[in-house]
């Protein structure tokens, strides 16, 4: 099953993405990882991406989309993939849709973790990172996963904060892009929802990001199961 995965920073998307990858044995594809891999291998597209990244600029679609498509053609994607972090705006959504159809690749499902902006920001600022496993959920602002005595609630390891998690300006900048309904990420999501209404695909799976982690997981697995993914 081919899936695009959306959710604002702070929604727990990374945790749920790791669960999908492990449970269904499909690759979790992130554009940042694709960039780094191509840059380290010195590919032509990787070198083009590097010129923008080194200047602190966004990599343009004409570089990003071919890199994404190259990754989706790899052998481990034969039985499906989970695309995370792309598209980020409506222009990228339209170009990705066209490119996938040209490649004969179907987009089966869109997963959206729905969470309000203020709640997402509070979660980010309360997030604590386990030095052993950054997928261990720890957050001082969420009672259900609040760590004990500043130690990981899963394994007891040391916890740290990420500098950018405490940078309100940086958080607001990322959320300005995500919550933009005109041409940002919410507009991209709506584009695929409109396609679903017209074409019948992709299936739209909305998850309540305000629930506890295990409740979101249960809802996610149930909805994927209804689509035949076991």
Image (cartoon, grey):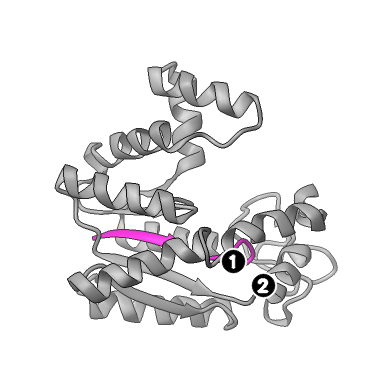
Q: Residue at x 81, y 53 (%)?
A: 167
Q: Position of residue 152 (x, y in %)?
A: 72, 63
Question: In this orientation, does residue 11 appear?
Answer: yes
Which residue is at the far right? 149
In the depicted structure, whether residue 103 falls above or below residue 200 = above
Q: Position of residue 26 (x, y in %)?
A: 31, 53
Query: Callout 2: helix, strand or loop?
Result: helix
The stretch in magenta equals 1-10
Q: Which residue is mark 2?
A: 117
Image-based side of 184 in relation to 157, left or right: left
Which sits in the foreground, 117 or 134? 117
Assess whether residue 5 is covered by the magenta stretch. Answer: yes
Which sits in the foreground, 219 or 22? 219
Q: Position of residue 85 (x, y in %)?
A: 48, 52
**Mark 2: few, some, or many residues within 10 Å (few <14, many ≥20)?**
some
Q: Which residue is mark 1?
A: 179
Mark 1 or mark 2: whose residue is earlier in sequence: 2
Q: Residue at x 48, y 54 (%)?
A: 89
Question: In this orientation, does residue 6 appear?
Answer: no
Which residue is at the far left? 104
Q: Residue at x 33, y 47 (%)?
A: 95
Query: Callout 1: helix, strand or loop?
Result: loop
In the rendered image, the quadrant that contains the N terminus is bottom left
Q: Position of residue 62 (x, y in %)?
A: 39, 33
Numbered badge on residue 205: none
């Amino acid at each position: 099953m081919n899936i695009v995965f959306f959710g604002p920073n702070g929604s727990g998307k990374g945790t749920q993405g790791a669960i999908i990858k492990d449970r269904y044995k499909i690759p979790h594809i992130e554009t940042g990882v694709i960039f780094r891999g191509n840059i380290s291998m010195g590919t032509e597209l990787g070198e083009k991406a590097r010129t923008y990244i080194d200047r602190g600029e966004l990599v343009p679609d004409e570089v990003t989309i071919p890199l994404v498509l190259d990754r989706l053609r790899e052998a481990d994607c034969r039985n499906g993939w989970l695309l995370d972090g792309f598209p980020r705006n409506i222009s990228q959504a339209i170009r990705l849709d066209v490119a996938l159809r040209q490649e004969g690749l179907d987009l089966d499902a869109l997963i959206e973790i729905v969470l309000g902006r203020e709640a997402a920001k509070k979660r980010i600022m309360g997030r604590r990172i386990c030095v052993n496993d950054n997928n261990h959920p720890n957050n001082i602002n969420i009672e259900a996963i609040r760590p004990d005595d500043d130690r990981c609630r899963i394994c007891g390891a040391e916890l740290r904060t990420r500098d950018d998690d405490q940078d309100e300006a940086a958080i607001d900048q990322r959320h300005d892009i995500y919550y933009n309904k005109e041409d940002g990420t919410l507009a991209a999501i709506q584009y695929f929802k409109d396609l679903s209404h017209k074409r019948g695909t992709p299936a739209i799976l909305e998850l309540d990001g305000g629930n506890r982690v295990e409740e979101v997981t249960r809802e996610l697995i149930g909805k994927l199961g209804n689509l035949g993914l076991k």
